[in-house]
Image: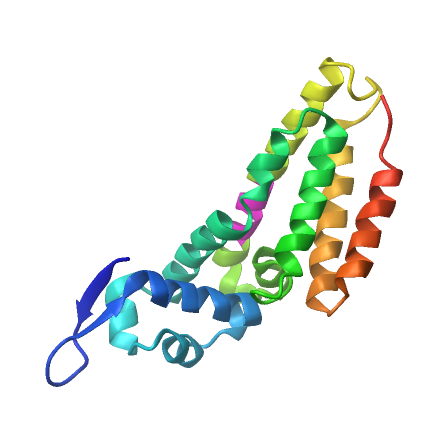
């Protein structure tokens, strides 16, 4: 845990835990999206003043980027694990099950931070939207490469379009996020995964 001293405006500087403050900011962004999270929402949840926020994290956009780093580290670790599955179907199943576990968890806000923020971003937050899209594209490229390998190994038919199959999978993943955010039950999301896997192409 890191702690910093920031001026509280009068009297002695106040010490706060940077990691805890960032985790609190993440929950606000995750619940409300980038634009929906006001500075007042953030400072109240983080337990710090605006000057302290600026001193420790920079501006709101810089804080969001750090929160997005934390989100990817803590909530999207299943993606790298999925890519190590021995088959393409195994990759898809790990991604889908991991998404349900992450986005429908009772331990945090429901839905995907990236989807929430990219969909809700207007013209004033184009930089944030572009950042989210860039990070998502990097993950999609890794899945495409894994499916190309599956084709070379005979695990997927040579006629399969790896890019198109990845786009299909991403559409399901985004659907899981949106439905989870709308309150869909764990059972309904698991059923969606089961149906998707039943339609997975064979070699």
The correct choice, above or below, for 140 with respect to 8 in the image is above
Name the image quarter holding residue 49.
Answer: bottom left
Nearer to the camera, 17 or 40: 17
> Where is residue 196 drawn, in percent x and y?
84, 44
When the figure is inspected, residue 22 is found, relative to residue 71, above or below; the finding is below
Q: Residue at the spot x=68%, y=24% of the render?
A: 86
Main SS category, magenta section = helix
Residue 134 in the figure: left or right of residue 111: left
| Residue depicted at x 30% and y 76% | 48
- In which image quadrant can residue 85 be found? top right
Tell me which corner region of the image, top left, top right, bottom left or bottom right, holds residue 104: bottom right
Counting from the top left corner in percent of width and height, residue 178 is at: 72, 61
Q: Which residue is outermost to the bottom? A: 10
Report x, y in % for residue 10: 13, 85
Q: Is residue 145 left or right of residue 159?
A: left
Q: Residue furthest left?
A: 11
The magenta stretch is 130-137
Q: Residue at x 16, y 75 (%)?
A: 7
Quadrant that contains the N terminus:
bottom left
Assess whether residue 166 is covered by the magenta stretch.
no
Give the answer, above or below, for where 2 lies relative to 45.
above
Q: How many marks?
A: 0
């Amino acid at each position: 845990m890191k702690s910093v001293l920031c001026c509280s405006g009068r009297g002695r500087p106040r010490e706060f835990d940077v990691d805890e403050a960032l985790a609190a900011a993440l929950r606000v962004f995750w619940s409300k999206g980038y634009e929906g999270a006001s500075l007042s929402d953030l400072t109240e949840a983080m337990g710090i003043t605006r000057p302290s926020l600026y001193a420790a994290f920079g501006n709101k956009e810089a804080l969001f980027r750090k929160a997005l780093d934390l989100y990817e580290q803590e909530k999207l670790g299943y993606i790298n694990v999925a890519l190590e599955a021995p088959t393409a179907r195994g990759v898809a199943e790990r991604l889908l099950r991991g998404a349900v576990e992450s986005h429908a968890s009772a331990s945090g806000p429901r839905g995907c931070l990236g989807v929430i923020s990219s969909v809700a971003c207007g013209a004033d937050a184009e930089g944030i939207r572009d950042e989210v899209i860039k990070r998502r594209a990097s993950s999609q490229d890794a899945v495409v490469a894994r499916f190309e390998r599956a084709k070379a190994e005979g695990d997927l038919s040579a006629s399969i379009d790896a890019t198109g199959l990845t786009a299909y999978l991403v559409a399901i993943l985004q659907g899981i996020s949106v439905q989870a955010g709308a309150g869909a039950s764990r059972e309904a999301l698991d059923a969606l995964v089961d149906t998707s896997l039943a339609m997975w192409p064979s070699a």
